[in-house]
Amino acid sequence: MRNSNLPEIDDKTCITGTMSLLRSLREKTVRRVALAFFVIQTVFPVFPLSALVRAEDSFGKNDSVRNVTLGQLAAGDVQLVDLTHGLNEKSPFWPGADYQPFELKTIATIEKNGVFSKAFAMPEHFGTHIDAPCHFEQGQPSLDEIKPTDLFAPGVVLDVSMAAEADPDYRLTVADVTNWEQANGAIPTGAIVLLKTGWNRFWDSNVRYRNQDLQGKMHFPGFSAEAARWLIKERQIRGVGIDTLSIDHGPSKDFIVHHVINGAGRYGLENVAHLDKLPARNFFLVVAPIKITTGTGGPTRLFAVLPRSK
Ligand SMILES: [Zn+2]
């Protein structure tokens, strides 16, 4: 069967035919590249951030952030909230045997070397960071294997800071989630669900942030396994985030929420900063972790994009 798009070639005109075939293919390729280039150039200024999210994902119909464009982002015509803690030697960290404080040392100075340069050392799970799916479950993606498209998503904030004030071991319930939806509408499919516990205010004190009792058991709020399962099953969330050391609450020994989230191939974000600066919904998250080959997690720059309030 002859492909009707290609020029016909017989034996006599083989060379001429081949050349014209090559020319025709080359022209087609050039035309296609030019067309793609034209489309990108034309569409880019109005390319909505929501298009970065998979087609089946959706913002709520009243979420005006869906109309924010990359052009507006580049022009600074949006609100950008940095949800990342700065890293320094005072940053709180997990009380594990091989976990150490952040280290930073100068390895070259302009005076001595003509260049200013430093070296740092830290555990993967330190400061504002991501837990890759392989952190608690075998056979799940490592940090470098997380699909880039999964790092852009609509976000929501569920606030349990009142409940956590009364009970530092509080865990988000399914009822908390459904009550939130009653007030705010359904959580967008494929969203990242951030839990605001009020723990951000203790960030300056490792002791207060860990909140260990005399036995060394930590006390801070977290997700419940039931709520995590519900969010995965009912809302196909991309991941969860929290403003504490762990998505499991402080006293947890089985880290069940980590198992539920990682077991579903999803990621967690821990020590998220400034959740008090976000609305309950109508923002877009940009999750930018370091890319450690085979990493189980790593420091992550986290931004929320909000429509500029008029
Ligand atoms: Zn972690």
Image (cartoon, rainbow, N blue to C red):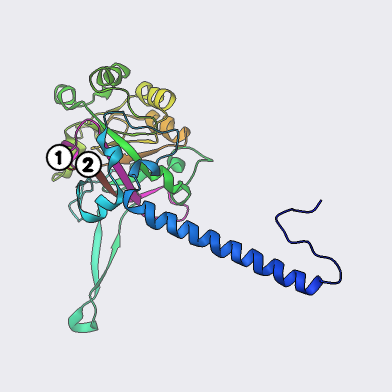
Query: Do callouts 1 and 2 mark residues in contact (Cβ within 8 Å)?
Result: yes
User: Residue at label 2?
Assistant: 306
> In which image quadrant can residue 131 be found?
top left
At horizontal 40% and vertical 36% (from top left) the residue drawn is 238
Q: Is residue 164 left or right of residue 11?
A: left
Q: Which mark is residue 197?
A: none
- Which residue occupies the foreground of this view, 3 or 124? 3
Q: Position of residue 223 (x, y in %)?
A: 31, 27
Question: Is any atom of residue 300 visible in this view?
Answer: no
User: Residue at label 1?
Assistant: 309
Label 2 crowd bin: few (<14), some (14–19), many (20+), radius 10 Å: many
Q: 293 above or below 180?
A: below
Magenta region = 272-299
Q: Position of residue 258 (x, y in %)?
A: 39, 33
Q: Amino acid at mark 1?
A: Ser
Q: Position of residue 147 (x, y in %)?
A: 46, 46
> In which image quadrant can residue 259 be found?
top left
Q: CA distance from mark 1 to mark 2?
A: 8 Å
> In which image quadrant can residue 11 be found?
bottom right
Q: 215 above or below 93?
A: above
At horizontal 26% and vertical 17% (from top left) the residue drawn is 182
Question: Is any atom of residue 93 visible in this view?
Answer: yes
Q: In the rendered structure, does residue 50 fall within the stretch colored magenta?
A: no
Q: Amino acid at mark 2?
A: Leu
Q: In the rendered structure, does residue 292 fall within the stretch colored magenta?
A: yes
Q: Is residue 139 left or right of residue 196?
A: right
